[in-house]
Image (cartoon, rainbow, N blue to C red):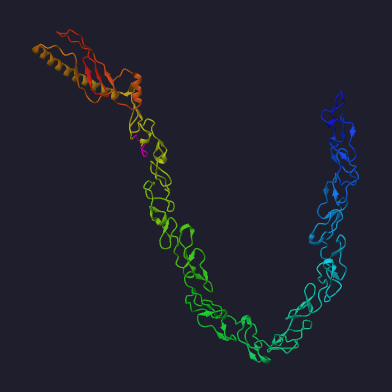
Amino acid sequence: MCSNGEVCNPVNGSCPEGCSAGWKGKDCREACESGSYGVMCKDKCSPHCLDPTNCDSKSGECYLGCLDGWVGDRCEQTCEGGWYGAQCKRKCGHCYNEELCDKIHGACASGCASGWIGQNCNNSCAKGSYGIMCKDTCSAHCVDSADCDHVTGSCVGGCLAGWMGARCNQKCTEKSFGEECGKVCGHCFDNAPCNHITGACQADCKDGWLGQFCNESCPEGKFGEKCQQKCGHCVSGNICDFASGSCSDGCADGWVGSRCNIVCSFGYYGENCLQQCNVNCKNTKDCNHINGFCSNGCADGWLGEFCDQKCPDGFFGPDCSFNCGHCLEEDICSHVNGSCFSGCARGWHGRYCNESCESGYFGDMCTQKCSDYCIESGQCDKITGFCTNGCMAGWTGNFCELECPTGTFGEHCMGNCSEHCLNITDCNHVNGSCDGGCLSGWIGNHCQIEVNEINGIPAETLLGIVFGVTALFIIIDIIIVVVVLRFTGRSKVRGSSFPRRLSILSVNYYADVNSGNHAADRQNRDAGHVDQDVVLTTCGRSFNQENTGSHHEQMNYVSKENRYISSWE
C-alpha cells in the first residue's frame, strides 16, 4: 500500500514515497501491529482508549471508546470543566469554593459546598439542617423550625414575633417588637426597652406619654407631666418634647430658644436664626425672619425671592431689565453694571460695548483704521476690517493691503503687465506702466508701441549714433590735418623726417555702430550692453614723405577698456 496511491516499483515492488498510514515493510504489505497506527506504524494508540491495543491502524481512533474522563476520536481530550465520567456526560456536583470535580469519578477534592453532601456532593441537606456537611440546625425561632434553606439556614416561612434576621436568631432592636419587628416600642420611662415580643414597657411611661404601651402622646401643642404645658414653634409643625417642651428636631425657621418661642434678631432668619439676610437685598437688614425673602426687592443684577439669582446671561441692572452689549468672544457682561470683563467685541466700544465703530474704523475698541485703499476710502467692515466694496486699482487682499501680484495691475488685479517691460517687477501695480523702461524695440508707457530695428537697435537710436559718429570723424580729421600741417611745417624748417607714428587721445564714451561681428553684437545687445569695443570703418590715407617715401594706412579704434584712438599704423 504505497503512499497517496502511488504505483510501486515494477522491479522490486518498493514504494518510492513510503507506505500509506497503517502499513509498513519494504513493499508496504505489512499491517500495523496491535496498539500502533499511522505512517510506518510509528504512533501508539492512546492509553486512554478503553482498549489501548485496539485502535484504527490508520487514524488511531479508539474502536471501543474512551476511558471515563476522556473524549475525542483518539481519547486525547479531558472532560470540559464541570463534567466527568464516561464520554464526559455526567455533571459535577456542588464542590466547595466552586472547585472542579475529578474528571473520572466526579469526587470533590476539598469537600462539598454548604448545603450539600454525598460522595459527589449532589445531595442536599435533610430537612431541618443546613450548612457545611449539613451540621447546622434550623433556628427554633423560625415559623417552621424544620423548614430553612439547606444552604444558608434562612427561615423559609419567616420569624416568630420578636425575632429577626435571615436565620431568626436575633431579638428585635430596643425600639421594636412583634412580628418581623415591625412595631415600634412606646416611650418607656428612662428609655428602657420594651418587651421585644409584646411591646410592653417594663416601667412607667415618660412625661408626655400615656397608654398601656406609652405610645399615646400629649394632645398637639401640649407637653410635660400630664400634658399640661403649651409647646413653642417646632420645626415642620412638629409637636414639642412631651416631657420638657423642647422641640426634638429643632425650632421652626425664624424661631430660637429652648422652647422655640423667641423670634430671630433683626437681620437674621431661618433655621436657628443662623442665616444672615442676603447682601443682595436692597437693604441687607431687611428680610423676612422666617424665610429670608428680601422684602424691598433686590440690588442691581439680582433676582429671586432671596436675591440669590444672577441676571440671566445677556441682561443686567435693576430687575435685570437691560440688555448686555457686544462683549469680547461673546462673553457675558457683568450682571450688575453691564460692563464687559474682557472688553468689547471687535467693532464695538463704549462703556457697555453697545456703540458700533464710527465710519472709517474697526476692530478691537474701534482703534484700527480702515485701509486707505478701500473703495470709498474709510469704508470697511466694523468687525473684520475687510473692504466691503472692494479695493482701489492696484490693490488686493481682504484689507486691500497687498499690491497686485507681480505681472498684474489695475482693478481686481485683472490687468496683465506688458511682456515688453524691461523688468516685469517694475510694472506699476496701479496703472500697469513700465516704470523700469521697455525692451529694445518697444516704447510707450506700457511698452506697447513697436518700432523698426536695425541689428536690434531702434531706428531713432541708430540715427543718433550715425550723426554722432559722423561729427566725431569730422573733428578727428580736422585735428589730424592741423597736426600734420604743423609737423610738416616743422620738418621743412628744421629738415627733420616725418614722424612714423602719431597717437591721438579720443573720447571716453562711445556707441556701437558695427563691430563687424554680428553674433557678438546680438549677444551684447541681449545682455543689456550699450557700450562695447568697435572699429570705426574709415577710408585709408597715404602720405608721400620725402625722406621715407613709405605708405601708411590710417585705422581708427575705440577701446572699451583703454578708451583711446590709435592711428597711423
**Along the horizontal axis of the image, is 123 left or right of 564?**
right
Viewer-proximal residue among 376 and 365: 365
Relative to 266, 357 lies left or right: left
What is the quadrant of residue 431 in the picture? top left
Which quadrant: the C terminus? top left
**Vertical side of 442 occupied by 44: above or below:** below
490 left or right of 103 in image: left
Coordinates of residue 529 in the picture (x, y in percent): 32, 26
Vertical position of residue 133 compared to residue 14: above or below: below
Magenta span: helix, strand or loop, mainly? loop
Q: Position of residue 322 (x, y in %)?
A: 47, 66
Foreground residue among 563 and 210: 563
Q: Quadrant of the N terminus?
A: top right
Task: Examine the rendered structure and indicate whether residue 471 appears above or below residue 494.
Answer: below
Of 72 and 49, which appears nearest the observer? 49
Magenta includes 431? yes
Task: Provide residue 488's location: percent of width, then percent of height.
Answer: 12, 13
Quadrant of the rendered image containing residue 91: bottom right
Q: Is residue 461 left or right of residue 241?
A: left
- For the question of whether residue 359 can be seen, the reply is no
Query: For the magenta stretch, what is the residue range?
Result: 428-434
